[in-house]
Amino acid sequence: MKSIEKQKVALVLSGGAARGIAHIGVIEELENRGYEITSIAGTSMGSLVGGVYATGKLTELKEFLYTLDKSKVFRLLDFTLNKQGIIKGDKVLKKMKDFVPDMLIEDLPLPYAAVAVDLINKEEVVFRSGSLYHAIRASISIPTVFTPVKEENRLLVDGGLLNNLPLAYVDHREGDMMVAVHVNADIPHLKPETSKESVKRQALYQKKIKEFYNHILPSSSTADEQLGYFSLITRSFELMTARMAEEKIKRYSPEVLINVSRESCNIYDFYKAEEQVEAGRRAAIEVLDSIEKKQL
């Protein structure tokens, strides 16, 4: 296989919650082939993975994610009952400080942009300077799920609300190859073989989730129906962001598009980190092999 030595890459990473862990596999495959990532733009989980990569701590983040099981994920999700969201995110972000130092974006070794949305002024907010931690915290604030980030004249939520694949905001210079990673693609997913033990653990996790919703949404409806209500909200948001991402792809036509199926996992399946990293790696291998064969 012929690799492209020192081909510079302007990398754009979509949101997708747990699906965004696939970005790690894509980045590792790009580096293994000698590509040089010279700029990054991301939304939501894409902003987190991209920011951690820029700080040089991507391996540490991956190793931490690999330690997560369903019970650990559940404990990290600090639930709240205020009207702006059901997860504050404090526990998650406190842990993420191990990988996201409160440093300035302008001090990173490469240009970086994170996208959020200001609900008050009804516009996208692009962080290219200032606190990296603050930018990521704003970018991952999924409406109705995570509590938003308040500023003096702004209320910031997940950038995926308006732009889940921020192709326009990456520092794309002459000679750079724009690589976009879309982890909510409407394509089939080949599921890995599941062991009986894995099925058993998953059933226990789902039971805990249902018990939680039965607690916060008491009514005559069943826990299954309550979980379905929450799924309706998240699936609606996912559909909206996916369709907007497809429009961005048509408009900006990145040289390389790496798609990961939205069926690869649910948005809170962070315990499937290893599977998601490999899903990203496989998707990158398929696309990059095709490109490099054409250049032979």
Image (cartoon, grey):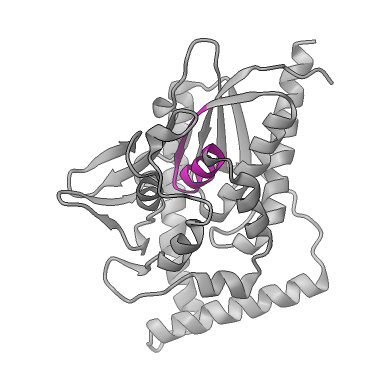
Q: Quadrant of the N terminus?
A: top right
- Main SS of the magenta part reads helix
Nearer to me, 128 or 131:
131
Which residue: 38% across, 48% down? Answer: 139
* Picture quadrant of residue 229: bottom left
Residue 296: % across, % down: 80, 10
Which residue: 43% across, 44% down? Answer: 241
Any part of residue 166 in sight:
no
Number of numbered markers? 0
Which residue: 57% across, 69% down? Answer: 73
The span shown in magenta is 39-54
Q: Is residue 119 left or right of residue 293?
A: left
Q: Is residue 219 left or right of residue 194?
A: left
Residue 157: % across, % down: 32, 52
Q: Is residue 116 magenta?
A: no
Q: Is residue 59 left or right of residue 145?
A: right
Residue 51: % across, % down: 49, 42
